[in-house]
Image (cartoon, helix red, strand yellow):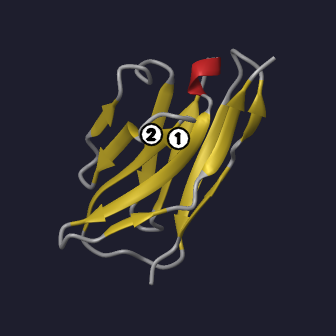
Amino acid sequence: QVQLVESGGGLVQPGGSLRLSCAASRSISRIYVMGWYRQAPGKQRELVADIMSGGKTNYADSAKGRFTISSDNTKTTVSLQMNSLKPEDTAVYYCSVQTLVGFNYWGQGTQVTVSS
């Protein structure tokens, strides 16, 4: 069983930066897409950004220009650099890995709180 472990969350002031990282417990074969989602209290989980195995990236409108997703398929890690953070970015952030054969792995989530 593959486990995804996120790190890097925490409390940051508005305008600050955080870098989230997600590492798999073992190598995952035939990766289709790796991504970051978030869920704020009382809201549905939403996509923040994802990156295809070929390197193509996709961002939610709220993340464009502020967040950067990157991955290292060899090590099965995916990171999310978040700059210019806003209070509305406060949420639990989850990493996700989807494979070409239909497996979808999720991390346990890491809390990001943007507050002064």
Residue type indicated by callout 1 = Leu
Q: Is residue 85 visible?
A: no
Q: Furthest residue to the right?
A: 116
Quadrant showing the C terminus: top right
Q: Would residue 48 appear left or right of 99 to someone viewing this image?
A: right
Give the Cα separation between the discs numbered 2 and 1: 5 Å
Give the image location of residue 114, x and y in percent: 70, 25
Q: Earlier in the sequence, mark 2 or mark 1?
A: 2
Decide: few, some or many residues near mark 1? Use Cα within 10 Å; few <14, some 14-19, many ≥20.
many
Task: Write down the quadrant of residue 6 in the picture.
Answer: bottom right
SS of the residue under disc 2: strand
Give the image location of residue 74, x and y in percent: 41, 67
Q: Residue at x 51, y 74 (%)?
A: 3
Decide: few, some or many residues near mark 2? Use Cα within 10 Å; few <14, some 14-19, many ≥20.
many
Most foreground residue, 43 or 101: 43
Q: Are marks 2 and 1 in contact (CB under 8 Å)?
A: yes
The disc at residue 80 is: 1
Q: Residue at x 71, y 16 (%)?
A: 14
Q: Is residue 49 visible?
A: yes
Give the image location of residue 22, x and y in percent: 55, 57
According to the picture, the residue beneath numbered tag 2 turns out to be: 69
